[in-house]
């Protein structure tokens, strides 16, 4: 299949959050470092012609704040994000179910989620043709604001296991 038919899936772990014992996990905000790192991912997307046309984000505050920073960097090209409560604390299978229901009109999707689901999903989807260094990096350590970029030649509904090529694993720090 020619490259213009490829779909791009980007799996972003939210940026670094603050940890306050008195705040419920769902309501944890980004830390100062998270506020510095999150825009760098949006900037990478613009610089690498990887602007999504659909953004799916967990309902957790740290994921929503990460999304805001990314969208700010995308500027006018940023799509309206879709809040997906099912992505909070979701397993790889639950995340994949959300992706399998993405409309075929979307050719580039950014999903903002959490560990361990986001890392497990990237590993589940990584084909044998993936960039080996990227797969080793994401399998070894998937830090906050870590971004896996995958390409897939089929339909979103067909995406399942070992059928997407990991092309990049991006970690940007301020």
Image (cartoon, rainbow, N blue to C red):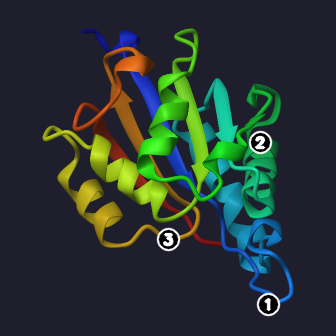
Identity of the residue drawn at 49% across and 33% down? 97
Nearer the observer: mark 2 or 1; the answer is: 1
- Numbered circle sitting on residue 71: 2
Neighbourhood count class around disc 3 (C-alpha, 10 Å): few under 14, some 14–19, many 20 upward: some
| Mark closer to the chain start, 1 or 3 | 1
Horizontal side, residue 47 vs residue 143: left or right:
right
Vertical order, 95 against 20 (above or below): above
- Numbered circle sitting on residue 143: 3
Q: Position of residue 59 (x, y in %)?
A: 76, 50
- The residue carrying mark 1 is 21
| Mark closer to the chain start, 2 or 1 | 1
Q: Is 81 or 131 nearer to us in this picture?
A: 81
Q: Quadrant of residue 56?
A: top right
Neighbourhood count class around disc 1 (C-alpha, 10 Å): few under 14, some 14–19, many 20 upward: few
Whether residue 50 is visible: no
Identity of the residue drawn at 31% across and 18% down? 153
Nearer the observer: mark 2 or 3; the answer is: 3
Q: Quadrant of the C terminus?
A: bottom right
Q: Position of residue 150 (x, y in %)?
A: 37, 37
How many discs mark residues in the rendered view? 3
Query: How far is mark 1 from mark 3, CA to CA?
Result: 21 Å
- Numbered circle sitting on residue 109: none
């Amino acid at each position: 299949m020619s490259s213009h038919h490829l779909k791009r899936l980007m799996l972003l772990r939210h940026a670094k959050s603050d940890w306050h014992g008195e705040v419920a996990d769902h309501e944890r905000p980004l830390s100062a470092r998270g506020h510095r790192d999150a825009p760098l991912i949006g900037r990478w997307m613009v610089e690498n012609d990887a602007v999504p046309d659909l953004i799916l984000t967990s309902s957790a505050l740290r994921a929503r704040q990460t999304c805001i920073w990314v969208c700010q960097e995308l500027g006018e090209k940023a799509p309206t994000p879709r809040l997906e409560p099912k992505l909070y604390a979701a397993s790889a299978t639950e995340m994949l179910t959300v992706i399998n229901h993405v409309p075929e009109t979307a050719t580039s999707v950014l999903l903002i989620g959490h560990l361990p689901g986001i890392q497990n999903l990237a590993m589940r989807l990584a084909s044998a043709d993936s960039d080996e260094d990227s797969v080793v990096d994401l399998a070894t350590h998937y830090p906050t604001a870590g971004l896996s970029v995958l390409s897939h030649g089929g339909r979103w509904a067909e995406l399942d296991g070992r059928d997407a090529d990991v092309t990049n694993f991006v970690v940007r720090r301020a």
